[in-house]
Amino acid sequence: MTLKDRPKQPIESCKITITYYFNDKRRRDPSNFDKFVLDFLVESGFITDDNYFVIKEFTTKAYVDKDDPRTEIEIIEIEEV
């Protein structure tokens, strides 16, 4: 996901999965990383807010990839009925 992938209007209801690929096995506090990513998604216009009215389902995963550390963010928009 890049800023070019940003929707024309911020998403109002979604599922988000954040997958971290770290370069080592050090212990990390996932809530610190998640807060940073969610704040970025709001401030950059991907989602309207980072509360549970907007984010209906939230998943965090973490793996080690020494050759290609990265963060992958999947946002699936949910149509409200």
Image (tube, grey):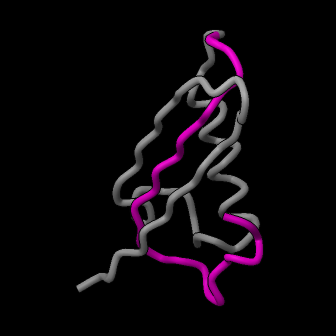
Residue at figure coordinates x 57%, y 65% from the top left: 49
Provide residue 75's location: percent of width, then percent of height: 49, 64
Image vertical order of residue 32 relative to residue 7, above or below:
above
Q: Residue at x 30, y 82 (%)?
A: 80
Q: Position of residue 27 (x, y in %)?
A: 61, 10
**Whole-percent x and y of residue 54?**
44, 66
Q: Quadrant of the C terminus?
A: bottom left
Tag count in the figure? 0
Instruction: Write down the region rendered in magenta.
Output: 1-25
| Residue 67 place in picture, x, y as percent | 72, 29
Asked whether 73 falls inside the magenta stretch, the response is no
35 to 10, vertically: above or below: above
Foreground: 39 or 76?
76
Q: Quadrant of the N terminus?
A: bottom right
Decide if residue 11 is on the left or right side of residue 58: right
**Snapshot quadrant of residue 28:** top right
The answer to whether 55 appears left or right of 28 in the picture is left
Residue furthest to the bottom in view is: 8
Q: Quadrant of residue 57?
A: bottom left
- Residue farthest to the front, as pictured: 67
Please name whichever residue, 49 or 59, is drawn nearer the observer in this view of the structure. Answer: 59
Q: What residue is shown at x 65% (from left), y 89% (from top)?
A: 8
In the picture, measured across the screen, residue 51 lies left or right of residue 6, that is left
Q: Nearer the viewer, residue 48 or 6?
A: 6
The residue sitting at the left extreme is 81
**Which residue is rendered at x = 62% and y = 87% of the image?**
9
Residue 15 found in image quarter: bottom left
Q: Left or right: where does residue 79 sit relative to residue 49? A: left
